[in-house]
Image (tube, helix red, strand yellow):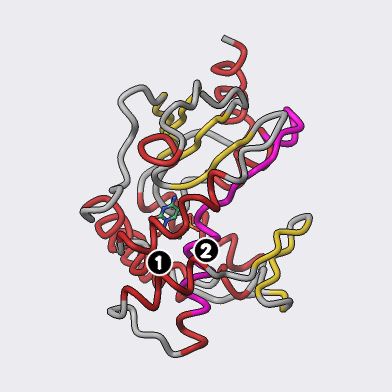
Amino acid sequence: MNEIPVITIDGPAGSGKGTIAKLVAKKLGWHILDSGALYRLTAFAALKKGVSFEDESTLAILARNLDVIFDDGEILLENQKVTTDIRSEECGNAASKVAACGVVRDALLQRQHDFRQAPGLIADGRDMGTVVFTDAPIKIYLTASAEERAKRRLNQLKENGINASLPRLIQEIEERDDRDMNREEAPLKPADDAIVIDSSKMNIEQVVKKVMEAIDK
Ligand code: DC
């Protein structure tokens, strides 16, 4: 049994998992795993190399051999900074397609386990509590309405200088939810022992407070 503690934070696109994971990791001084970035990087590499999303075995090879460095908030793929590129809606939607492929998920499993380093890990994703770190003592499932999540995404994109339309974002978020929740491999759902937090009417501080209360208990 692995003694290093893990707190999993799963939930749909735009639920604020990434922000909450970063803040909680900072408070505790723990490491962080942004597992979505691994799927985004695989999709990004596939788009760049012209690999079809139907070609599962080549996608799995790409995923297994990702030459990636996570360096203090920056992400380097084959020594090129891709931190902002992989955050585009196009890459997020492509990641959701790539992530439906079981062999890709298997190829990324060990890489995710390797993030479990002392003193502890905050793991952010879709299947952190249900598949990757089933023994995590604290599992959070963070959600919010599709409209609220689309609004947050719109603001996030604006901050990064990317333009988008709200109705289109709502539609894309609903499509992504549908794909992530209804796929056969590791579908997005709360673990049986997860604490479910609906952040639709909560601000960031309130959500962090709720997570920290769960940890203190
Ligand atoms: O969290 P994100 O938006 O960066 O994730 C991008 C896509 O990757 C998401 O739509 C589904 C997939 N994903 C996954 O299937 N499993 C994870 N643990 C994390 C992300």
Q: Which image quadrant is residue 31 in?
A: top right
Q: Name the quadrant of the C terminus.
A: top right
Task: List x then y, in percent, for residue 8.
Answer: 50, 34
Residue 31 belongs to the span the image colors magenta = yes
Task: List x then y, in percent, for residue 82.
Answer: 66, 74
> Is residue 171 positioned above or below 9 on the image?
below
Return the disc, 2 or 1, that comes first in the chain's sequence.
2
Residue furthest out toward the bottom: 50
Q: Residues within 10 Å of mark 2 (few under 14, many from 20)?
A: many
The numbered dot on residue 112 is none
The numbered dot on residue 169 is 1
> Which residue does the image show at 55% across and 27% down from the upper left?
2
Say which of 65 and 12 sits in front. 65
Q: Residues within 10 Å of mark 1 (few under 14, many from 20)?
A: some
* Residue 148 horizontal side relative to residue 35, left or right: left
Q: Amino acid at mark 1?
A: Leu
> Which residue does the image show at 35% across and 51% down from the upper left?
146
Residue furthest out toward the top: 217
Q: Which image quadrant is residue 87 in?
A: bottom right
Count of residue discs: 2
> Which residue does the image show at 37% across and 71% down from the upper left?
168
Mark 2 and mark 1 in contact? Answer it, CB < 8 Å: yes
Q: Secondary structure at mark 1?
A: helix
Q: Which residue is mark 2?
A: 154
Give ligand 1's quarter of the image: bottom left
Task: List x then y, in percent, for residue 135.
Answer: 45, 26
Say which of 127 and 15 sits in front. 127
Give the magenta part as a residue range.
25-45
Distance CA(mark 2)–CA(mark 1) = 8 Å
Q: Secondary structure at mark 2?
A: helix
Residue 38 belongs to the span the image colors magenta = yes
* Residue 29 horizontal side relative to residue 100, left or right: right
